[in-house]
Image (cartoon, rainbow, N blue to C red):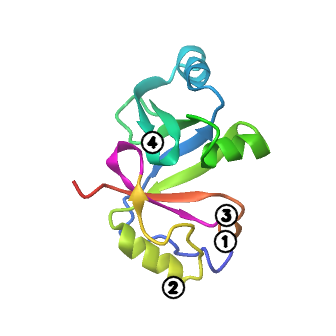
Amino acid sequence: MNPKLENLLPSDLDGHVDHIGVAVADLQAGIALYRDLLGLELERTEEVPQENVQVAFLKLDRSGGRGHLELLAPMGEGGNIAAFIAKRGPGLHHVAMAVPDIAAAMERCRAAGIRLLDDKPRPGAGGKQIVFLHPKDCGGVLVEMCAPGDG
């Protein structure tokens, strides 16, 4: 394992993958695939205007587990998801890890030499605070850390 990544996340990590983000060109078509054909339960949809994206959260575990599949569809031509789809096409976008204290997690990443794509936490779906880690420092994977919002 890359020494940079060893013990990257804080020891008080909430202990689960919060969600797996999948970029889709059409949110309703994505929902039809994952809910109607593959049987995942749709929990909610929402818009995140500051990111120019519509999202749908589908439960990965019907027995009460916390993990979700997050479908991300651009609301227009601007924004990171529209750019991602234009460059790479639809597909796996990121893996999000739950952290109880996002500031502490950010500091720990900085101390480990992991570059952050965000200087400070920003609002994400579901009222969470989010920060992304540079994929070049995470084995080619875009990693999101997310924590409960401030209220």
Image location (x, y in percent) of residue 79: 60, 47
Local packing at callout 2 (Cα closer than 10 Å; few below 14, some 14-19, many 20+) is: few
Q: Residue at x 62, y 49 (%)?
A: 80
Q: Nearer the viewer, mark 2 or mark 4?
A: 4
Which residue does the numbered mark 4 point to in the structure image?
Answer: 49
Specify which label sits upstream in the sequence, 3 or 2: 2
Determine crowd level at label 1: few under 14, some 14-19, many 20+ residues with C-alpha closer than 10 A. Answer: some
- Residue under pointer 1: 137
Identity of the amino acid at label 3? Pro
Horizontal and vertical percent for residue 56? Answer: 47, 31
Task: Determine the secondary structure under disc 1.
Answer: helix
Judge left or right: residue 102 versus residue 6.
left
Any part of residue 100 in sight: yes
Residue 111: mark in rendering: 2
Residue type, mark 4 in image = Pro
The span from disc 4 to disc 3 (Cα, nearest Å) is: 24 Å
Q: Is residue 52 left or right of residue 14?
A: right
* SS for dot 2: helix
- Asked if the residues shown at circle 3 and circle 1 are in contact, with their CB atoms under 8 angstroms apart, the answer is yes
Residue at image mark 3: 135
Give the residue drawn at x 66%, y 71%.
137
The region drawn magenta spans 124-134
Please tell me which residue is depicted at 61% across the width and 20% down the height of the picture: 29
Please tell me how many numbered marks the rendered image carries.
4
Alpha carbon of mark 4 to alpha carbon of mark 1: how far?
28 Å
Q: Are marks 3 and 2 in contact (CB under 8 Å)?
A: no
Residue 88 horizontal side relative to residue 63, left or right:
right
Magenta stretch holds residue 131: yes
